[in-house]
Amino acid sequence: MTTDRRLAELLMASAELHAHLCPRQVLGVRMSLLAGNLLGLDLPQRDKRLITIVETDGCAADGVAVAAGCWVGRRTLRVEDFGKVAATYVDSKTGCSVRITPRQDARRLAGQYAPPTDDRWWAQLIGYQRMPNELLLDWRSVALRTPVEDLVSRPGLRAICAVCGEEVMNEREVERDGLTLCRACAGQTYYSSRGSDVASLDVVDTRAGSLAWR
């Protein structure tokens, strides 16, 4: 399959998933295609060898997922929301990792690779499909601060939070003062509860050796 045909098919798949095609989806697909070349992997993958970390949600993430074959439900796609169109691709077998981002001048150069138009969005949509990698994308090898083994954990590992009683999977529990806690009960929650006596207790203080609600 030629590169152009492969790109077209992946863009069609991304558009079907996303309900339309936009420039950032093109970037996501191009990033994953480049990652496959750099890591020597045949993408989109059919197994779980590649782990991808995207740095924003939205359009680009769908393009990345489709072309890489990485999905949240398969635990091969993670979102670290830095608000950036960027992705790090991790070969879990070799440990090699590469981070790929659009070049800062890609928007400006896109019009040179598209038919003449005053519509910048359209110029980017077409131009991003045609630009060579070296003008569209930047890439570099990186090392993860968290080992990939810790990211994916092991199947079948479960713990019960000593406070809320909810099950915690994939070694995401926190040990504090001899207690096994979920991250929410350890004070790392992203929500505050409402509507019940228990729900109003949102932070656990175990420094005194016993549970005290604030």
Image (spheres, rainbow, N blue to C red):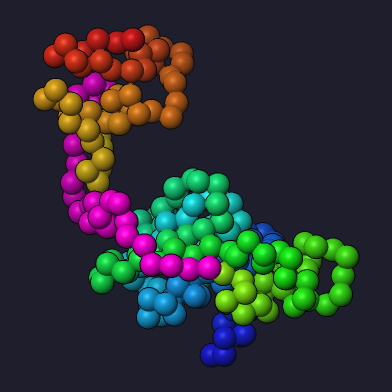
Query: Range of the magenta residues?
Result: 138-165
Q: Image quadrant for the N terminus?
A: bottom right
Taking the image as shown, residue 168 lies to the left or right of residue 22, namely: left
- Vertically, is 99 above or below 165? below
The front one of 36 and 96 is 96
The front one of 198 and 178 is 178
From where the camera sits, is residue 33 visible?
yes
- Vertically, is 184 above or below 13? above
Determine the residue positioned at 23% across, 36% down.
173
**Image position, residue 4 (x, y; %):** 62, 85
**Image position, residue 40 (x, y; %):** 37, 80
From where the camera sits, is residue 68 visible?
no
Taking the image as shown, residue 38 lies to the left or right of residue 61, namely: left
The front one of 59 and 148 is 148
Q: Is residue 151 magenta?
A: yes
**Image position, residue 73 (x, y; %):** 40, 55
Determine the residue positioned at 57% across, 90% down.
2
Question: In which quarter of the view is residue 161 placed?
Answer: top left
Determine the residue positioned at 77% across, 62% down.
121
Question: In which quarter of the view is residue 185 placed?
Answer: top left
Extreme-bottom residue of the structure? 1
- Vertically, is 60 above or below 44? above
Count of marks overlaid on the render = 0
The front one of 121 and 108 is 108
- Vertically, is 200 above or below 121? above
Q: Image quadrant for the C terminus?
A: top left
Determine the residue positioned at 25% across, 15% down.
205
